[in-house]
Image (cartoon, rainbow, N blue to C red):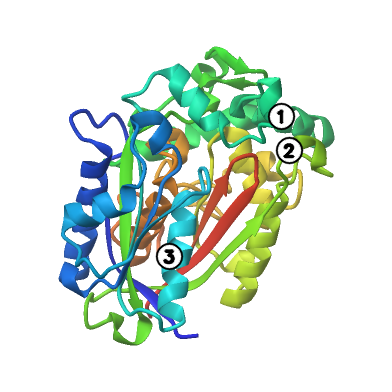
Amino acid sequence: MRGVSIIGVGTTPFGICEGMSLKELACKACLDALKDAGIDKREIQAFYVGNFISGILVGQETIAPLIANGIGLPKDVPATKVEGACCSGGIALRHGYLLVATGAADFVLVAGVEKMTSASTEKNTEGLASAFDQETEGRTGLTFPGFFALIARRHMHQYGTKPEHLALVSVKNHSNGVSNPRARFRNSVSLDEVMASRIIADPLRLYDCCPISDGAAAAVLCPSDIAASFHPRPVDILAVAQTTGYSATYEMEDPTTLIATVKAAKQAYEMANITPHDVDVAEIHDCFTIAEIVDSEDLGFFPKGRGGFAVEEGQTLLGGKIPINPSGGLISKGHPVGATGLGQIYELVLQLRGEHENQVKDAEIGLAHNLGGTGQLCTVTILRRRV
């Protein structure tokens, strides 16, 4: 298989994008990515778009050809929607990567999009709950705050993790979001403010939860050997792994470990021929503060049970051992579920180009971790700055 690189990225802000439809959001991100890549849309040979619940929230399915037509892609270009709950964007990237790596196409456009804020809270809750197994946990009324609250309680019981550890994740990510113009929330919060916010699902409080958002992000992929002729700072894709986890909590041997993340990380590290200690910056799936802690352990950045203590010690800050979510993560940026995976890629490409608002010094290798559902599926992508 041949090397694959990212030569262009585009995004909308994540947040309440009033007056912009789902199609308009996706078209803007795609056109920006094409412009950044310096190629004509007529050169694109395939298009993938990640999306989760457009049918439920905005009554629009079959969105891939709608977006393809909106940006003027040629009619002989296959346009495909992929769905994997909150992991949809990461899966779209993997499909595009494989197409280029195998030589089936030279130029592939990948995108992710979701329009959420125009729907009611009840409709969003219904849509997100469709990721549960409706024959088991879906019948119990379990929600995602409830699921991750169970993980948090068990993590506290097994490892001594404290509510303050969770709160410090929120403090860090909100602080990072202040400088990110793409973030929905650009305000800092104190530890006391997080700890005083209302309970959503004990022990998770309001500031422990990511907000729903609108948004889209996109990237243009091509073979590595020609990438430099399109962009002066192409970013190489070293690995994209996708794995499957359990569909219900009762199936999990240890609810403090999401096995899909562990397996995807192992595959990605082997494919990239690196270890977790080689990663300079990471954008990981902090849909809830406990998720960032568990993710950081499952990805091998910290021993099991030490993720919360690592946050307390400052190891995940911008100047720490492994800066995690310098973009502000889902907690600050928001979580337009279909777009999140490619939003992470956008942030990492800026980091590896040396262009990010919260730049990690001398960042060479970046990791994106995109989780779907209750850990039912996961992608881990590893990127490297061209040296």
In this rendering, the answer to whether 133 lies above or below 142 is below
How many circles with numbers are drawn on the protein? 3
Percent from the top left, x then y, of residue 28?
20, 49
Q: Earlier in the sequence, mark 2 or mark 3?
A: 2
Q: Is residue 311 visible?
A: no
Q: Which residue is denoted by mark 1 in the rendering?
A: 137
Toward the viewer: 7 or 60? 60
Q: Tell me whether circle 2 and circle 1 mark residues in contact (CB < 8 Å).
A: yes
Provide the residue designation for mark 3: 363
The reply, left or right, for residue 282 in relation to residue 219 is: right
173 vs 200: above or below: below
* Cα–Cα gap, marks 2 and 3: 37 Å
Which residue matches tag 2? 248
Q: Is residue 266 left or right of residue 319?
A: right
Mark 2 belongs to which amino acid?
Ala
Looking at marks 2 and 1 on the same chain, the residue that comes earlier in the sequence is marked by: 1
Residue at left offset 50%, top offset 43%:
86
Q: Find residue 179 and report its image quarter.
A: top left
User: Which image quarter is the C terminus in?
Assistant: bottom left
Mark 1 and mark 3: span between their CA atoms?
A: 41 Å
Q: Kindly check if marks 1 and 3 are in contact, taking CB atoms under 8 A apart as contact.
A: no
Query: Where's residue 139, x and y in %?
Result: 69, 24
Q: Which residue is drawn at the image coordinates 83% and 35% (left, top)?
A: 158
